[in-house]
Amino acid sequence: MDHTNHVRLSTADLVPDNLEGASVYGADDEKVGKVDHVHGVGEASTVIIDVGGFLGLGAKPVAVPASQLDFMRDEDGEVHAVTTWTEDQLKAMPEHRD
């Protein structure tokens, strides 16, 4: 996916209503997970990403700082995130428990 024309979200846009359900693309530009939920707002928030699994089953939730993700909107207005982590690196993180 070419992200060059996608509009970065401002800090004020980093709220759960905008981020939950967003696809997350990794270092190789492959989809590595999906935002399940968010704790807090802005760059100081924590984003819970479901990694792995199939159709939402068997996915592992991991917590990452929002500041480590680059959230943007594509041409259709859909929010997604880009990170430098690979799916394997995210899977190696400790499982998040609410």
Image: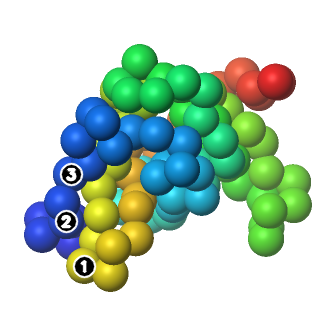
- Is residue 63 left or right of 12 when viewed as pictured? right
Mark 3 Cα shell of 10 Å, populated few (<14), some (14-19), many (≥20): some
Q: Earlier in the sequence, mark 2 or mark 1?
A: 2
Q: Quadrant of residue 85?
A: top left
Q: CA distance from mark 2 to mark 1?
A: 7 Å
Query: How many circles with numbers are drawn on the protein?
Result: 3
The local secondary structure at tag 1 comes to loop
Residue 58 percent across, percent down from the top left: 87, 54
Residue at the farthest top position: 44
Residue 29 percent across, percent down from the top left: 36, 61
Q: Earlier in the sequence, mark 3 or mark 1?
A: 3
Residue at the farthest bottom position: 76
Q: Is residue 16 visible?
A: yes
Q: CA distance from mark 3 to mark 1?
A: 12 Å
The amino acid type found where label 2 is placed reads His
Mark 2 Cα shell of 10 Å, populated few (<14), some (14-19), many (≥20): some
The amino acid type found where label 3 is placed reads Arg
Q: Is residue 86 above or below residue 79?
A: above
The local secondary structure at tag 3 comes to strand
The amino acid type found where label 1 is placed reads Glu
* Circles 2 and 1 in contact, beta carbons < 8 Å: yes
The residue wearing badge 3 is 8
Which residue sits at x=41%, y=59%? 80
Q: Is residue 69 above or below residue 78?
A: above
Residue 56 percent across, percent down from the top left: 80, 62
Residue 38 percent across, percent down from the top left: 59, 35
Which residue sits at x=21%, y=72%? 2
* Circles 2 and 3 in contact, beta carbons < 8 Å: yes
